Image (tube, rainbow, N blue to C red):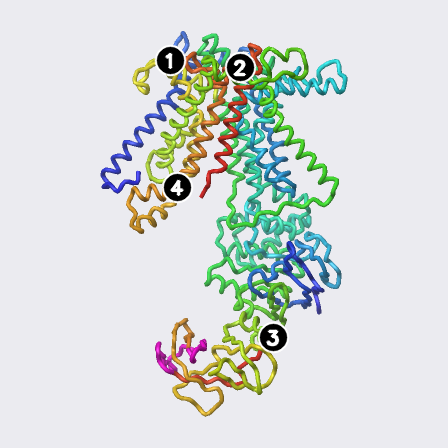
Amino acid sequence: MMGKSSNKKSSVSKVVMTSLLIWVLVGFILYPVLRTFQLSLVTDNGLSLSNYLNFFKTEAYRLALKNSIILGFLTVIVCGVIGTLLAFLVHFFELPFKKTLDRLLLLPIVLPGLIIVFAFVQLYGESGLVTKTIQTILNLEESPLRLSGLKGILFIHAYTQYVYFYINVSIAIKHIDRCTVEAARNLGASKWKVFTTIILPFIKPALIASSVITFMTGIGSFSAPSIIGGSYKVMTTQILLSKANNYMDIAATQVIILTVVSLMYLGVIRFYENKSRFVSSVKGVSIKPQKIHNPLIKLLLIFLAFSIVIFILLPIIAIFILSFVQPGTWMIEIYPKEFSLDNYIKIFTKSRSLAPFINSIVMACLTAILCIVVALPASYIIVKTKSKFKLMIELLIMLPWAIPSSAIAINMINAFNRPSIFTGNQILVGEYILLPLAYFVCLLPLMFRTTTISLQHLNDTYIEASKSLRANSIQTFRKVVLPIITPGIMGGTMLIVIRSIGEYTISAFLYTVSNKPISIAMVNGIFEYEIGLSMAYGALVVAFALGTSIFISKIPKF
Amino acid sequence: MELLALENIKKSYEQKCVLNKVNLSINEGEFFTFLGPSGCGKTTLLRIIAGFVRPENGSVYFESNNITLLPAEKRNVGMVFQNYALFPFMNVYDNVAYGLKNKKEKKKTIEQQVRKYLNLVRLEGYDKRNVSELSGGEQQRVALARSLVMQPKLLLLDEPLSNLDARLRDQMRMELKELQRKLGITTIFVTHDQTEALTLSDRIAVFDQGVCVQVGTPHEIYTKPVNAFVANFIGDTNLYKAKIENNKAILNHTTTLELSSDSTGDYISIRPQDILITDELRVAPNQLNGTIEKVAINGQLVEYIIMVDTLELKVIKLNTYTDSNDYVIGQKVCLSIEPKCIKILNK
């Protein structure tokens, strides 16, 4: 990349790199999408739209589509309200333990969704710990909480997905220019007016951007609907059903429709986003947290903050405690009474129980390696060269971001259930590698963003400065380039590992006996009434995720 | 007539006192400047007048009403911020119209007023422009129009020229003064730049570490500084610690200067332009022998650093054709200082 080699040599290597990259991106991202699209159009009577007509004629499918869209919008609203309020609570007002609270509020982003679902079932389900406790205290006949259907899914989404709003709005609040607030007051604006005409426009882009990602995860959500959705059928669960019944053409049609919904939302929002975007021209002074003078309100806010902390930590604590429950006990009692290390001993001594754990770690590492190998050169081309293929590469690499995970899984099946030139004429369906490949496609946009930001930090003048101080290319790379780009890339890689290690949606579609991951083992454990064992798996993943994210936060950044 | 009075203003942040017992009175129509190095409390004082900061002690009177506790949005005081604080998501028109909309003016009045003030700051036809597309000078003018359109009784300017490049700064300085004269609006100007303060102001208040050390016209401040800090901060000067005895200032064991009057103090200040370079010693008091140490040409002026034994003197001469006897480094020269040019000061 930085070779001192002659121009000709470097341009040859650039062409080779670009071609290889485009080959990979087309083969594993675009081609699978097109295959699914093709499959949805091919029927017994040749090319036709009959699959789509059939979809819209079938009541159950229409309902699932409607449910998915409703779920998407409601997720945006619920998470938007919660995330924005929390961001204001932590960053707009003066509050004790602000930093700790901020850290805790970011926690759900590293916890795999499936584990949260199970933890919630154990806590708030019909016979959950919290439900039973409330029932006992209030002496109720029926259980007061029912974690199922749309409400149940939304409850879980609220926990797992407010983070996007929280992060983006927090950043936006920190970027509000204090002087503009003062200027508005100087021009006679009341507090309410300042909020609606100054503060809201400042955070609007953050709200819009968060709504996109939240909507996409909302309509693509699979763990919560499949486990507690009950009669509330959504597209993702329908797709799995079609696949299980081997109606691949119906699955393909459903995948295309779900993808189109996702892209349409993205398109509408992008249009709107362009209208509300602004450039802050001068360096502002960030706002000071507002002091709360009323002691009653202050107490109330502190109480609120404290409840939030408990609510966030409870599922994690529950997982750890339940992972020690002695197998075969805790059948009819409200609270488990016998604890032991048996679940962990089982995982680490029985090869059948250990295999999923090993599989997940190996596949997560494979995914991370694939992501770096593809994302780094792609970012390099985007940031540091004037290649004609920049736009094409960026579009291809970001495409999976707009496609729900379940759709990616189906696309992978459709593309690689027969020999293709991209796989050296191999059939990948049923092979070990297909699952990490699908993880890779799904997480590539995340890695690409990280590497792009890291390379953007790598100002060319550093390299020039190093060279002018008589360092050769290798020394420059080792002493200047690596220290600058490594922290970001390491952080990104760890995040990829965390995300793939507890992944459930893609796994449910693509796992085979040879690569059964930990998430599937957890689900199986639950259905075989080995709750303790499931929770032990969950605890291991959570411990790993927490350890890793603490490690990420400790990486020094430049 | 007095428009604004500050009485005994005190403010500290985290036990550090940033303003201490500040008393000031500002008259209607005046261009008044708060001058001082950064961190001297001048911006805090401005923000107290605007109503963004509440003083711990003391009161602010505006048109004889105590407004110390009045919220910022209820004061008829305009402010232009150092970074202009234009609303980035509004165009030029909406920025200028913002205050009038808060006042709930009629749409037609708003339009008329906005046009009038955009014309006044020479930005006609810029209404629909996005503020981020404007140059620094243009943004500055939008900020000015946005404040002026409210027709405030008092205009506060917080280092408004500091974000402009040198040439634009000179131009905007002239425009600002012209506009102030035309509108007759009472203006408080905050700056750390003594040239700005001297050229623009009717009166200047000099601040040092939260205390207002001197108030006066630019001429008074320059010619009669009350202490060593003011003498050194406003304009260049040669400032020396000295022992004052019998109409003489003893600088060190070799150099003693005669003074015109005998007042007490521990410092003497001599402006560089008051020291004359001559070819031979004259029959007059305060004749010194020195060696040229450094020469710097700064356009219309030539600046010399001259060593008289161990004493370093800065001397400034006009860089003219007729008097172009340039001295070179190492050259021996004679110096002459009139006793009345030597000011005796306290710390």
Mark nearest the camera among 3 and 2 is 2
> Which residue is painted at 46% across and 85% down in the image?
B336
Chain letter of the residue carrying label 3: B
Mark nearest the camera among 1 and 3 is 3
Residue with the mark numbered 1: A417
Is the C-beta separation of discs 1 and 2 under 8 Å?
A: no
* Alpha carbon separation for disc pair 1 and 3: 91 Å
Secondary element at tag 2: helix
The stretch in magenta equals: B307-332
Residue B263 appears in the picture as rendered: yes
- N-terminal-most mark, 1 or 4: 1
- Examine the rendered structure and indicate whether residue B289 appears above or below residue B125: below
* Alpha carbon separation for disc pair 3 and 2: 84 Å
Secondary element at tag 3: loop
- Report x, y in % for residue A420: 32, 17
* Alpha carbon separation for disc pair 2 and 4: 42 Å
Image label count: 4
Secondary element at tag 1: loop
Mark nearest the camera among 1 and 2 is 2
Residue with the mark numbered 2: A523
Residue with the mark numbered 4: A483
Marks 1 and 2: same chain?
A: yes
Question: Please, what is the three-letter code of the amino acid marked with disc 1?
Answer: Asn
Marks 3 and 2: same chain?
A: no
Question: Please, what is the three-letter code of the amino acid marked with disc 2?
Answer: Val
- Report x, y in % for residue A328: 60, 10
Check residue B226 in the rendering and tell me which mark sits there, or answer none.
3
